[in-house]
Amino acid sequence: MAGPTAHSWAGGPVNPFKGQREAAIRWTLRICALTSVVGLVLMVAFLLRESLPAWKEAGLANIFAYEWNPDKGRYGILIFLAGTLAVSLVSLLLGAPLALATAIYLHAYARPAWRRVIGKGLEVLAGIPSIILGWLGFTTLVPLVRRLAGGTGMGILPASIVLAVMILPTVATIARDSLDAVPESFAEASFSMGATRWQTLRRVIIPTAWPGIAVAMILGLGRALGETMAVAMVIGPATAFPRNLTTPTHTLTTKIMLEMGESTGVHRSSLFAMALVLLALSMLLILLVRLLSRKAVREFSGGVLTC
Amino acid sequence: MKGEPVVAVRSAVRSPSGAPPLGEGNGWRGLLEERAAKAARKASMADRAAGLVFKAAAAVSLAVLAFIIGIILVKGLGTAVRPSFLFGRPQAMKEGGGIGPMFISSLYLTFLTTVIVVPLGVGAALYLAEFSRDGRLVRLVRWGTESLSSISSVVFGIFGMVFFVIYMRLSYSLLAGALTLTLMNLPTVMRVTEESIRAIPWSYREASLSLGASRWETARRVVLPAALPGITTGAILTMGRIMGESAALVYTVGIFVRKPPLSPLQPAAPMAANIWHLYTEGALIPDWMRVASGEAAALLVLVLLLNLGAGALARVIRKKMGIVQ
């Protein structure tokens, strides 16, 4: 939001509004802007409406339970919640170190030409459709895991590897931006005292950029939580608690995707309840990002003031 | 830990009384110098090792991208470039089918969504950057946009199903899918547009206003043209995202059709969603692996063209308009 807030149209010497046409245009644009809010509200409202039978007839205790068996009226979602969390966390574990190292390379080591090439590469990687990554995982990664670990070759491990690739550009780009946002004088001060590049990075740049790097990882986690197709093609699917990394399981998104078409009644409604849980999870992450960015802004201005 | 003594030790060497350096015979100084040199060597070795690690990471990232593109193209491009495949009729029970209707569906859906989401997003961004005075409203819009951008595409998909397909009675159709994708991509278009509007120097607007132009006249004749390269890039990148979307379309547009859609109210099957169909019910088609590989390659080529073309088009526009940046 680094806009020219100091300059405001309001209160200028000229009243730039010319009659009704201007007012009408203003209102039209305001409605455009409100579309996102209206859409969000509609979305929450309709998800609530559709999931109401599940909350009412199955009840909270039934939904937040382990057993999933719609034929017997058991609608526990904890298996899928566990699958979602496991897949996202493992993918972050695999993807974040690579992404952060790439970001550090781009910030501190890369020559301008390489910076451009790799930056563009990350952009292209971010644009590759998830269905293609899922297809690639299904045709190359799953047979490999099958050969190495036995079984079907599907499960949390291949899903996490595919997701690690998906979150790599997100995490790397945002982390690079927050490293770049550290004032150059910080690095200069460190160099002038004889520190090496690595010392400067480790002691000065990375600690200063830390809130931004945390935001990058949380946004990566958010992307992993919500990913559907790439995961669905390599995770199994099977309604079983993920005992290890190479047994088929399910996530919230894959369960919704695979069963929405062929379910009715409370069963269908419980899938909407899962969507609502997913929505709540991503809202929680956004809240976390907001808190962290506020912290980043505060620390940042503090740092500038002291030097 | 390892590198830090360098600075401290150096100042210790110089400090005691400001006396000139003593000769070799001085044990203290020799010792300190040796330690300083050792620490410096260690630090520079750590520095070099860290540099190697970061370079390797960047190389791995690039290699991953090359691997993905390479494998998909090697496996499918041979199939995808044949006109009888790209424009051919799909087959259900026998081999040799094409993806003509899916190809048309993808283009149609991308076009339809773009003509809805870009004007809407540009209007919204224009409001936020140029017209808004109400801080609360702006905060509300930002909250809505931010939240929308964090929501999973499958959640958009099932919302589109209950709202556009069932409640608005659009049934499975291109329009239902386009409206769902509009909601999904609105945050991106708004963000990119607002960024490029805010990058325009304030003096442009002052010049326009001082000539007596109104706010809207300024926005239309000065701000929007100057922001056009950025908006175009954003729009094309969004087209790439629309082209590749699948999870939001399975329950709003459809996953398989025999004939290309004509009206926006007809069901369709974009390529990305059709790959999902092949994956889940592919056994119906004997050569489904071939069809899916070819479709994936065709989709990837389209998305890559859009991604790489975006920047080039922006450069062309800048050049034509005489904007030097």
Image (tube, grey):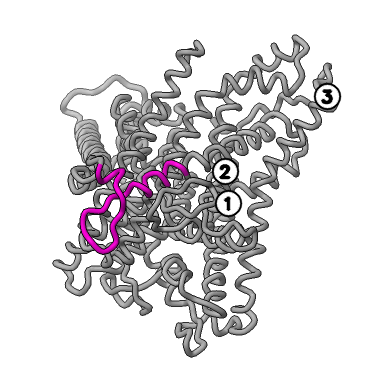
In-front residue for pair A94/B325: B325
**Label 2's element?**
helix
Q: Residue at x 46, y 74 (%)?
A: A262
Other-residue count near label 2 (Cα within 10 Å), few / some / many at <14 / 14–19 / ≥20: many
Q: What range is drawn magenta here?
A: B84-108
Q: Position of residue B8 (x, y in %)?
A: 35, 35
Amino acid carrying label 3: it is: Gly
Of circles 1 and 2, the one toward us is 2
Q: Residue at x 57, y 59 (%)?
A: B165
Distance CA(mark 2)–CA(mark 3): 31 Å
Q: Position of residue A266 (x, y in %)?
A: 56, 80
For the residues bearing labels 1 and 2, Cβ distance under 8 angstroms: yes
**Label 1's element?**
helix
Left/right placement of residue B216 relative to residue A290 reads right
The residue labelled by disc 3 is A11
Q: Position of residue A66 (x, y in %)?
A: 46, 83
